[in-house]
Image (cartoon, rainbow, N blue to C red):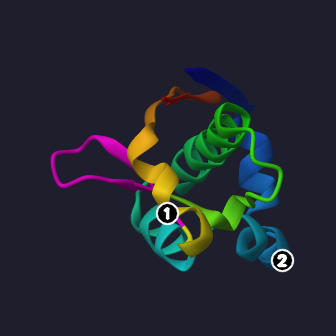
Amino acid sequence: MEIGVDIVEIARIAKSVRNRRFLERIFTPGEIAYCRSRKNSAQHFAVRFAAKEAVWKAVGEPRLLHRSIHVRNHPNGKPEVIFAAPFRKLARKVVISLSHGRDYAVAMAVFK
């Protein structure tokens, strides 16, 4: 079992997502639409960025790109990871937990 953790400043991500190139390099179209639909989109972008970093650290696959990791909420509200085609087999082996406050967002990933 491997564990990955990441914490980010929400203000830093809020500035970064104003840059279209950053936004499209890191987030999937579905994540962008979801985050933009939320009242405080910066918190949602930040926690997803932290989740991608935590998943990458836990999985340890250098070819895994941020856009290859899609973070979404299951209909029951629990966050889950969907991987791009070459990495789909990893999805059943990763669980994540997300949290954010006013200033920081944190994520933890466990790779079984």
Nearer the observer, 27 or 90: 90
Answer with mark 2 or mark 1, whichever residue precedes in sequence.
2
In this rendering, position of residue 30 left or right of residue 104 = left
Q: Quadrant of residue 108?
A: top right
Magenta range is: 71-83
**Image quadrant of residue 4?**
top right
The image position of residue 105, as x and y in percent, is 60, 31
Frontmost of labels 2 and 1 is: 1
Label 1: which secondary element: helix
- Asked if one can make out residue 40 in the rendered structure from this viewpoint, the answer is no
Closest to the observer: 83 or 8? 83
Q: Is residue 33 above or below residue 80?
A: below
Q: Which residue is mark 2?
A: 21
Main structural element of the magenta stretch: helix, strand or loop?
A: strand
Tell me if 104 is positioned left or right of 110 in this view. Answer: right
- On the image, numbered disc 1 is attached to which residue? 88
Q: Examine the image and state in which quarter residue 79 appears.
A: top left
The quadrant the N terminus occupies is top right
The tally of labels here is 2
